[in-house]
Image (tube, rainbow, N blue to C red):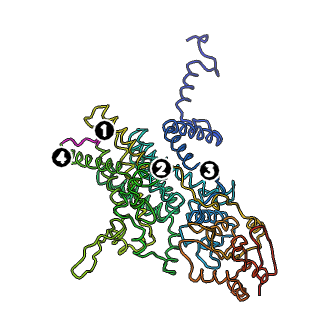
Amino acid sequence: MSSKNKPAKGKVTAAKAAKVVAAAKAVPVANPQPAVNAATKTKDWLLAAFRYKKAFFARHWKGTVVIALVTLVFFWPIVTRISSYSEGGDAMFNAWTIARDWHCILHQGCANYADGNIYFPNKDSMLYSETQLSTGLLTLPLYFINQNPLFAYNVWTIFSFFLAGWFMYLLAKRLSRGNELVSILAGLIFAYAPFRMAAVFHLQNLSIMLLPLAALLIIKYLDTALKRYLAGLFVTMALLAYASWYQIVFGIFALGILVAGMWVTRMLPWRKALLILGVMVLGAATVAPLAKEYTRFSKEQDAAFKISDQVLYSSSVTDYFIPHDGTLVGQLYYKLHPAAQHNAYNLDSFSYHGLVLYATGAGLVGVGGWRLYKWRKSKNKAHTDERQNYKYIAIFGVIALVGFVISLGPLLKFKGHFSYSSLADGTALVIPAPWLAVDEFLPQLEFIRAIGRASVLTLFALCCLLAFLPAYLRSSKLSGRARAIIMAAVVLLVIVELMPAHRVHMATGSYAYNLQIPAVYKYIKQHPQIDDIVILRSVDDYKGAPIPVMRAEDVLWAGYHNRNIFNGYSGYTPPSYFETLYDFVYLQADDIPKMQKLGLKYVIIDKQLSAPRPFLIDAAASLFPDKVYEDKRYVLYKIPQQ
């Protein structure tokens, strides 16, 4: 090669450069992707969440809108009085409960959660009924909007009905594989069936809205194996456990049967079944610290309910066949049978779920059981959606039956009376029901007095069974026209049989419509030194009040001002409470040292409800020289201290 053609020393030829570039590309780079900052990650996450919500709403907007509109129409009379209406009694007590929860969550005058600020100076007054701590937590944002407990109570009542219908709608849509009509109908039934009308103003009962959500999460986990559904199940069980002792027990019964049924029918391997059950148990077990306190209190005060209480508040078999007078078919029935028993023999709830639902559920269970039997005998073991549907039908059929049996309580009743045979010596032999074994071997559940509320499991299962009707009709040999006629007939008959014929029941007394925070309690809230109060009136209640109002109203406003009051209203009453209170009502000089001994520092006199017997007003004016505050209705005195 001539010197002319040789590359100059230090120069890089094209071929050599190409080799260098190729070698550089072959060397792995430690961080090939550019760094993504936290803001970009957050933006991407928000965009993904927005897209998911948009797609979710696109799939479910019809049912969501219908259930929301029905809820708004049904509760409109309360919507217009959202901060001023309460029927009294348990409704006011529940409003206090969630308000007290707020103060404890925010560490406002709550040294010990078990010690509520009612029935002072008694301890553990928060444990006299269900504390509904999760409800208090979920409604906490409402506290920063309006501190009136009635506002949060009414808002959450309305929202709970919507969620009950919406969660069931979502569950039914999964079970029906997308049938919008039957899913909406199932949601409306679960929200507004007669059983629900007995619990309109009982927040702890409304927490059963979480049951269809928990069932949906279990089925979603079966479909996808995604762990996020187990996380959701854990949270749901914890919320339900902290909302109501009754409903978590009923929920465990239903969900336990669901998971066990999935395993027995080989939809779920045993490892996954145990995993789901473990998540359920752990979620419910989060309430253990509070349960321990309840157990301690129950033993100390012997506060457990006996079999006689459970019998009184259990369902009769006949209750499942007595139409509700708030429905169209019920109104017709009672016009034709004016002397008939109305709604239920059960003093606490209604168990009528509709003959159409019974027939539909029974028909699906019967056909499903027969087809599963035939498939088991056949050589074709291939899995199909239709076969899975009938497995679900069998499982929900069992849940419906279990709910029915539990609701009958420890002793069987027909038409409100025991079913028994008379022996030769005239002794009545009462027929025991399965719940009697629970009382005998699992006394921890004796806190369940109103056992008839277990009927909600039957309602839940019937709504789930209804979701399979379209699939069954599609698999039948009926013509398309016949299937449409049957579906339309079922929908129409269910609406006539179960849907409320009027909006939410409202109290008749004028006192229920114009409740405002009394000025005296606003004054007390503004002066932290005012505490340990007894409220006295010479007349117990408003004239014609069908349920306790004033005792509950004292408690209601205690949720607002958050000071200790001697007065109270709850499922349990301390010994000698009424004796002491009525002694104070007939106010005399010797009552002052009694008040001092109890630690009471202030007394409020209700002038309006003492006007018919004004001796209390006069006695207070003469015995308490230190008047702190007075308005049109109340006067606040400071009790002389030793």
Q: Earlier in the sequence, mark 1 or mark 4?
A: 4
How far apart in space, not on screen, are marks 1 and 2 (Cα)?
A: 28 Å
By secondary structure, the bulk of the magenta-drawn segment is best described as loop
Asked if residue 464 is among those painted magenta in the image, a careful observer would answer: no
- Mark number, residue 500: 2
Q: Which residue is tagged 3? A: 79
Q: Position of residue 348 (x, y in %)?
A: 46, 65
For the point 73% across and 74% down, the residue is 605
x and y percent of residue 118 in the render? Answer: 63, 73
Task: State which mark lies toward you, 3 or 2.
Answer: 2
Q: Which residue is mark 4?
A: 377
Tell me how far mark 1 sits from mark 4, CA to CA: 23 Å
Q: Nearer the viewer, mark 1 or mark 2?
A: 2
Disc nearest the viewer among 3 and 1? 3
- Residue 429 quadrant: bottom left
Q: Nearer the viewer, mark 1 or mark 4?
A: 1
Whichever of callouts 3 and 1 sits on the residue coming sooner in the sequence is 3
